[in-house]
Image: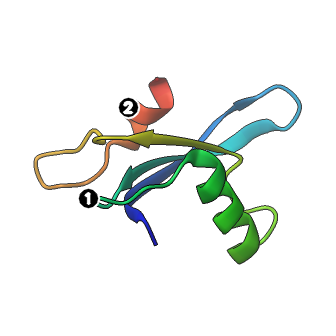
Amino acid sequence: PAVSLAAVVGVPHDRHGEEIKAYVILKQGAQADADEIVTWCKDNMAAYKYPRLVEIRDSLPMTATGKILKRELRSE
């Protein structure tokens, strides 16, 4: 409920090969931390779908048309 915008990408993982990471922008005035977001996702999503890693940001890289540049997020 506190999330305004999110992007989810796969990041390298030693054992599984890839792990889910969510980059999140919160709604203006909203308060949430990464653990609260992971808990909400865990309660409302299938076990293989919820992100284990969450990074809260002020902005996400976007194209001129407003699409999120996931390749830039993966390379960070």
Q: Is residue 13 left or right of residue 25?
A: right
Label 1 belongs to which residue?
28
> Mark 1, residues whose alpha carbon is within 10 Å: few (<14), some, or many (≥20)?
few
Residue farthest bottom in this picture: 44
Q: Is residue 12 left or right of residue 15?
A: left
Q: Is residue 72 above or below residue 51?
A: above
Residue drawn at x 49%, y 32% is: 74
Q: How many marks?
A: 2
Q: Foreground: 22 or 65?
A: 22
Compare residues 68 and 38 and report the one nearer the observer: 38
Q: Residue furthest right?
A: 15
Question: Mark 2 to mark 1: distance in Å?
Answer: 24 Å
Tag 2 secondary structure: helix
Tell me the element at label 1. Answer: loop
What residue type is disc 2 on?
Glu
CB atoms of marks 2 and 1 within 8 Å: no
Q: Does residue 35 appear left or right of residue 13 in this picture?
A: left
Question: What is the three-letter code of the residue carrying label 1?
Answer: Gln
Percent across and percent down for residue 27 are 31, 61
Marking on residue 68: none
Residue occupying the far left of the picture: 64
Coordinates of residue 38 in the picture (x, y in percent)? 66, 55
Please tell me which residue is depicted at 18% across the width and 55% down the height of the picture: 66
Query: Please, which colouring scheme is shown?
Result: rainbow
Where does label 2 land, which residue? 72
Say which quarter of the image contains residue 14.
top right
Q: Which comes sooner in the sequence, label 2 or label 1? A: 1
Give the residue displayed 31% in from the left and 49% down from the top: 68
Select label 2 or label 1 by which is in front: 1
Q: Nearer the viewer, residue 14 or 39?
A: 39
The picture places residue 54, in percent across and down from the top left corner, at 58, 44
Residue 47 at x, y percent in the picture: 82, 65
